[in-house]
Image (cartoon, rainbow, N blue to C red):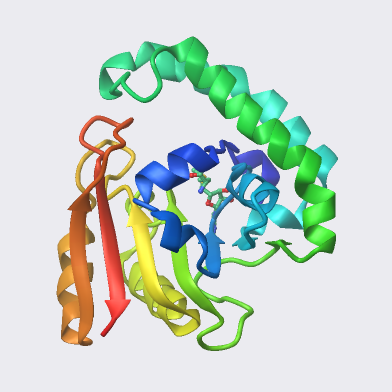
């Protein structure tokens, strides 16, 4: 991973709860967040005495390097959001200003927690489709805004291997959203449903009470039966 190719952007614990339909019981599960980036989910869960492990290849870089990259890209990302306002639903987040504040607050919480969390092994430098954990270590593995979103560059095989690997280490996988970057339904969704049903997994698609990308209010759950 080249840092100059990364546009770090992180969501909050409130957003994770809504995107993944996490109820009280879910929040007490052993959770792995795959591709958590500069989200504050791990930190905010830690503050509630709940343990999440987050993996991301971004974690090979130092706090200073990640912060520099956030500062170099943030204004552009917000300008793009402003220019493409019609692609988003301003319900959970009400304006571009609130978006900027929400994202920046999440990323600052992450940055302040990063070195401690790395030492505690809550942030681990790893990349799908290879996870450095033993079989069945987690109850729930999450992917927010990584799988399906980059379907133009990540082929179906990558998605199959990534989900297989997440199911090796966790009994349930949840992926949100099912859209790609053009806000179209990812070309891999139907095949992933078919393939994992064929592998005798329980696959479901649920509508959740969170929609930011227009049409992005669906969650895929894949469970071992
Ligand atoms: C758009 S961000 C989403 C961050 C976070 N999940 C959220 O929703 O706020 C996508 C993340 O995927 C990470 N990523 C890129 N390649 C990856 C891989 N092979 N395995 C896991 N994560 C990866 C990136 O570094 C980036 O942090």
Q: Quadrant of the C terminus?
A: bottom left
Hey, which residue is sitting farthest front in the picture?
Answer: 24
Residue 120: x, y in percent? Answer: 80, 63
Quarter of the image that includes the N terminus: bottom right
Q: Give above or below for 142 relative to 76.
A: below
What residue do we see at 81% from left, 43% from top?
Answer: 63
Quick check: can you spot residue 76? no
Figure check: 48 above or below 204? above
| Residue in view at x 58 percent, y 66 percent | 127
- Percent across and percent down for residue 158 are 39, 69
Counting the numbered discs, the total is: 0
Q: Quadrant of residue 3?
A: top right
- The residue sitting at 26% across, 39% down in the picture is 216
Q: Is residue 169 left or right of residue 223?
A: right
Q: Is residue 205 left or right of residue 124?
A: left
Task: Please state the horizontal and vertical placement of residue 168, each as a whole percent of the image.
Answer: 45, 84
Give whichever of 111, 185 is nearer the camera.
111
User: Which residue is found at the position 49% from the left and 15% from the top?
Assistant: 98
Q: Is residue 144 left or right of residue 65?
A: left
Rendering quarter of residue 137:
bottom right
Image coords of residue 107 (percent x, y):
66, 34
Dividing the picture into quadrants, the one containing residue 179 is top left
């Amino acid at each position: 991973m080249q840092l100059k190719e990364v546009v770090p952007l992180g969501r909050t614990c409130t957003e994770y709860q809504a995107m993944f339909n996490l109820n009280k019981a879910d929040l007490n599960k052993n959770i792995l967040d795959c591709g958590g980036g500069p989200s504050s989910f791990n930190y905010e869960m830690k503050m509630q005495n709940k343990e999440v492990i987050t993996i991301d290849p971004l974690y090979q870089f130092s706090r200073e390097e990640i912060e520099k990259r956030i500062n170099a890209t943030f204004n552009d990302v917000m300008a793009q959001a402003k220019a493409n306002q019609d692609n988003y639903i301003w319900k959970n987040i009400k304006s571009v200003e609130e978006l900027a504040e929400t994202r920046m607050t999440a990323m600052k919480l992450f940055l302040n927690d990063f070195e401690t969390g790395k030492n505690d092994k809550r942030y681990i430098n790893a990349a799908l489709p290879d996870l450095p954990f033993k079989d069945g270590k987690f109850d729930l593995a999450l992917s927010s805004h990584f799988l399906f979103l980059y379907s133009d560059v990540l082929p179906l095989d990558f998605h199959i291997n990534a989900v297989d690997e997440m199911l090796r280490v966790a009994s349930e996988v949840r992926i949100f959203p099912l859209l790609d970057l053009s806000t179209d339904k990812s070309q891999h969704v139907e095949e992933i449903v078919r393939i994992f049903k064929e592998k005798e997994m329980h696959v479901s698609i649920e509508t959740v009470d969170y929609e930011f990308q227009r049409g992005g209010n669906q969650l895929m759950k894949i469970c071992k039966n």
